[in-house]
Image: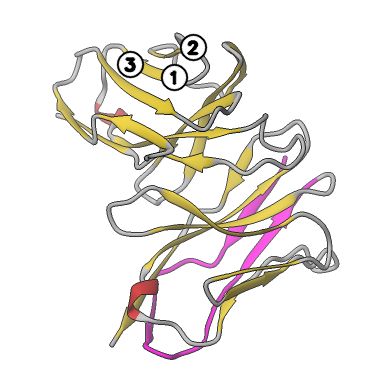
Amino acid sequence: DTAVSQTPKYLVTQMGNDKSIKCEQNLGHDTMYWYKQDSKKFLKIMFSYNNKELIINETVPNRFSPKSPDKAHLNLHINSLELGDSAVYFCASSQRLAGVGQETQYFGPGTRLLVL
Amino acid sequence: GDSVTQMEGPVTLSEEAFLTINCTYTATGYPSLFWYVQYPGEGLQLLLKATKADDKGSNKGFEATYRKETTSFHLEKGSVQVSDSAVYFCALSEDNNDMRFGAGTRLTVKP
């Protein structure tokens, strides 16, 4: 069974559209994250959620909004997509907030977003 | 703030060659250090980790030792295989902080 899954795997869309990427983890973890990987392969954390509470928000545009219906899911909504949003987005989860207890994060396969 | 710097790629080696990917970090406290690997078309996977100074993480023939005195966590493997071709990320995590990743190093191993 896949521990952390994301859908869709690929997403191609036009500028100005609104899209969502879904993430689910079946590990029973309390914390989930979204990362953006840029063209140089650098991963930048965007959000993390702990028990439905947003605890980290790394100065991303407010066009991006995480939504967590329950602790097993953390979806990423993006409004008014821009060309610069093209990237690979990774979802991850950990038992607790990474760092506290030095928890290991488990990553999903990534969603490749291309904005035309 | 905390940060991770790793050697820029790409790195191209022949099969059975020795691999070193350098990683150094800056942190205010005592972070845990990780190496993640991303195989083509897949997500990140934890390769190994070390949680305190002088710890050695090892997995699949890869090793890295947490060196506090040099703030380093270099990844090594004695004999690489074609299947080791991937992008390798060094990362750190400190108490009450998120994960900080390096830029990644692409390794290509040729038969």
Residue that numbered label 1 is attached to: A73
> At 24% from the left edge and 36% from the top edge, which residue is drawn?
A9
Amino acid type, residue under disc 2 in the picture: Asp
Compared to residue B100, the image places residue A71 above or below, namely above
Compared to residue B28, the image places residue B73 above or below, namely below
> At 57% from the left edge and 62% from the top edge, which residue is drawn?
B6
Dot 2 surroundings within 10 Å: few (below 14), some, or many (20 or more)?
A: few
In x, y percent, where is residue B73?
A: 68, 66
Return the residue nearer the eye: B68 or A60. Answer: B68
The mark that comes first in sequence, 1 or 3, is 1
Residue A70 numbered tag: 2
> Given the current orientation, which residue lies at the most extreme front position?
A1
Q: How far is disc 3 from disc 2 in space, using C-alphas?
A: 19 Å
Label 1 marks a residue whose chain is A
Q: Secondary structure at mark 3?
A: strand
Q: Secondary structure at mark 1?
A: loop
Boundaries of the magenta span:
B1-27
Return the residue nearer the eye: B20 or A109. Answer: A109
Q: Is residue B9 magenta?
A: yes
Of the two numbered discs 1 and 3 in the rendering, the one whose residue sits closer to the viewer: 1
Q: Judge left or right: residue A80 versus residue B103.
A: left
Residue A87 numbered tag: none
